[in-house]
Image (spheres, rainbow, N blue to C red):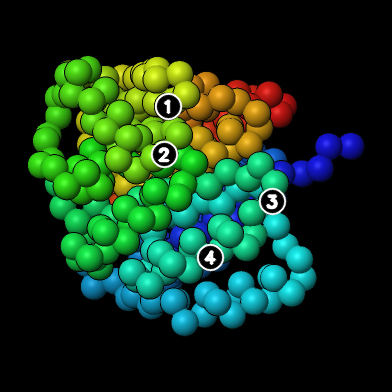
């Protein structure tokens, strides 16, 4: 019998608004992955489009959790970091990767700190430098264009983009940060399609996964994409096929949300898309 793959998800918890851990847990579980969670902060809601949310930084709790896990000999096949509660948590995550990674484990870092040309309210410029250090230790990073610009210290450009620009940016990220695989989200060459570009440093190849663009603001798409990407990778798919599977799942979730007519501030209707995601992973 093949042992079940395991992953540690290092993210915040939002009480309302399906993002971070409340997205990563069900998606990775559907992918057949056993997930341990290291919560970085607790918020009353996700932050996009919502005001007056509560925020509790859990930095003081993390090393105690790690000490307990270390005492029982826990190891993970993947470590997946997303939204961090403080700059201090970067060094904690780096220690976590060293202490809890199994042989041939994967460290996927989503540098969740900015979007649409702006840093999130909870961060400042010093946090960007810390996040850059974290990305330099990752096997895979999944930035959007705002985060890519911040990591490289260059000006953010709005879409649409050219292929030359996308491929120059993605190769710069790999070269500057020393990352083997870069998946750049929010790729738009025109107003009709949107998706991601995946770069494999070993082959120096850039591949694109693009789908029909749906107008509107949809929160938590990055968390769903990164979680489903990791789920595919842990099921044996290469970075290019994993990107295709993750784009299909994310876009399907957006379409289901539009059909349902709900308030997208509270997350996407991804639950009904999980069976198709599992089929794409050849689990059912």
Marks 2,1: beta carbons within 8 A:
yes
Q: Residue 53's spot in the image, x, y percent?
A: 29, 71
**Sequence order check, earlier mark of 2 and 4:** 4
Say what secondary structure mark 3 lies in.
strand
Quadrant occupied by the C terminus: top right
Q: Earlier in the sequence, mark 4 or mark 1?
A: 4
Which x, y percent locates residue 210?
34, 19
- Spatial distance from mark 2 to mark 3, Cα to Cα? 19 Å
Cα distance in 3D space between marks 4 and 1: 25 Å
* Secondary element at image label 2: loop
Q: CA distance from mark 3 to mark 1?
A: 23 Å
Position of residue 27 in the picture relative to residue 82 (left or right): right
Q: Assign a secondary structure to mark 1.
A: loop
Image height of 58 relative to 146, above or below: below
Q: Which residue is mark 1?
A: 201
Q: CA distance from mark 3 to mark 4?
A: 14 Å
The answer to whether residue 284 of the structure is visible from this angle is yes
Q: List x then y, in percent, for residue 217.
A: 24, 41
Which residue was labeled with disc 4?
95
Question: Neighbour class for label 3 at 10 Å: few (<14), some, many (≥20)?
Answer: some
Outermost residue to the right? 1
Q: Which residue corresponds to mark 2?
A: 179
Mark 2 to mark 1 CA distance (whole Å): 8 Å
Q: Residue at x 69, y 51 (%)?
A: 102
Against 243, is 128 above or below?
below
Counting residues from the N terminus, which is met first, the one under dot 3 or under dot 4? 4
């Amino acid at each position: 019998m093949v042992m079940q793959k395991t992953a540690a998800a290092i993210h915040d918890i939002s009480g309302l608004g399906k993002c971070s851990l409340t997205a990563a847990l069900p998606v990775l579980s559907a992918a057949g992955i056993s997930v341990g969670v290291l919560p970085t902060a607790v918020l009353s809601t996700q932050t996009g489009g919502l005001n007056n949310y509560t925020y509790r930084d859990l930095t003081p709790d993390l090393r105690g959790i790690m000490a307990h896990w270390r005492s029982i000999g826990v190891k993970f096949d993947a470590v997946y970091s997303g939204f961090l509660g403080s700059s201090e948590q970067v060094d904690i995550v780096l220690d976590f990767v060293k202490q809890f990674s199994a042989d041939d484990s994967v460290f996927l870092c989503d540098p969740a700190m900015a979007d649409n040309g702006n840093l999130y309210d909870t961060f400042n410029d010093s946090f960007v430098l810390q996040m850059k250090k974290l990305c330099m230790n990752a096997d895979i990073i999944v930035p959007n264009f705002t985060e890519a610009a911040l990591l490289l210290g260059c000006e953010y450009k709005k879409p649409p983009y050219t292929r030359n620009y996308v491929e120059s940016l993605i190769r710069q990220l790999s070269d500057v940060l020393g990352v083997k695989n870069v998946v750049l989200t929010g790729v738009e060459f025109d107003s009709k399609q949107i998706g991601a570009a995946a770069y494999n440093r070993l082959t120096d190849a850039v591949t694109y996964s693009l789908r029909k663009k749906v107008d509107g603001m949809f929160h938590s798409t990055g968390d769903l994409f990164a979680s489903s990407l990791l789920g595919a990778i842990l099921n044996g798919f290469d970075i290019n096929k994993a990107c295709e599977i993750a784009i299909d799942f994310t876009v399907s979730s957006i379409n289901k949300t539009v059909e349902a007519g709900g308030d997208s501030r509270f997350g996407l209707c991804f639950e009904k898309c999980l069976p198709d995601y599992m089929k794409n992973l050849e689990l059912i």
